[in-house]
Amino acid sequence: MSDVSDEDNEISFSVKFLGRVEVFRPDGMQILTEAWHSLTTPERDSTEKLQKKSKVCLFLSGSSIDILEHKSKFMLYTCPLPSVSFCGVLPSSPKVLGFVARHPAAHSYHCYLLQSSKFTPLLVSVIGDAFLASRRRQSIPGGRDLVVEALRHKNKVLQRENAELKKRLAAQTGEAQ
């Protein structure tokens, strides 16, 4: 299930966390497959193995993707949206999705793998939309907020509508006289 807060533009989904794997490239469907393979194949040197799937809360906001422990809401991972470079559904398993994000302190990338029985395509779409909105906010000249730009656009639309209604009203009152 998901929870949406219109006030804060935040959304959360209950999903299963499969694991996090360091990857060497920032994008591509092959990255998801390689990350999945490294989680599911036992290796002696690997510290990240596919253990019991833990239920987590995937929390999306206008600035980051947070993975929280389901019951305690303890923050497990946080990925600022500008650090996300790829998101997709695992081709061999349509219930598994993953996203790649740059580590904030190191010059490395991690692939986060999650499982959802119902929301996988929706989650990929929502993460992609949040990423694009984050990019738009960053690219607005003068550092103006996206909300301000949206309000300005709505204001222009309402001004045009108001002018059209004034013309129609003037035409109707002209006919009545």
Image (tube, rainbow, N blue to C red):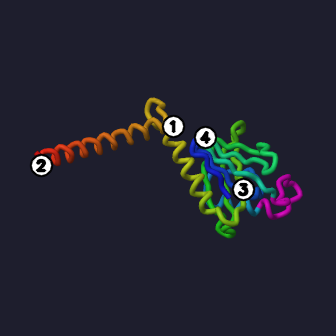
Where residue 112 appears, x then y in whole percent? 71, 53
Label 3 or label 4, whichever comes before in sequence order: 3
The label on residue 138 is: 1
In the image, residue 106 lies at what x, y percent?
72, 38
Along the line of sight, the residue nearer the viewer: 130 or 160: 160
Residue tagged by mark 2?
A: 175
The residue lying furthest to the front in this view is 177
Figure quadrant of residue 28: bottom right
Instruction: Please identify, in this view, whether the residue under mark 1 or under mark 3 is nearer the observer.
Output: 3
Distance from Cα at disc 1 to Cα at disc 2:
52 Å
Cα separation, mark 4 vs mark 2, equals 55 Å
Residue type (three-letter) at the residue carrying disc 1: Gln
Residue 132 appears left or right of 21: left
Amino acid marked by disc 2: Glu
Please, what secondary structure does the residue beneath circle 3 have? Answer: strand
Q: Quick one: SS at disc 4?
A: loop
Per the image, is 127 magenta?
no
Closer to the camera in the image, 75 or 85: 75
Q: Nearer the viewer, mark 1 or mark 2?
A: 2
Q: Nearer the viewer, residue 131 or 58?
A: 58
The image's mark for residue 14 is: 3
Residue on which the image places disc 4: 63
Instruction: Name the residue: 81% across, 46% down.
Output: 72
Query: Helix, strand, or loop for circle 1?
Result: helix
Disc 4 marks a residue whose amino acid type is: Ser
Q: Earlier in the sequence, mark 4 or mark 2?
A: 4
N-terminal of the pair, mark 1 or mark 2, is 1
Looking at the rendering, the stretch of residues picked out in magenta corresponds to 38-53
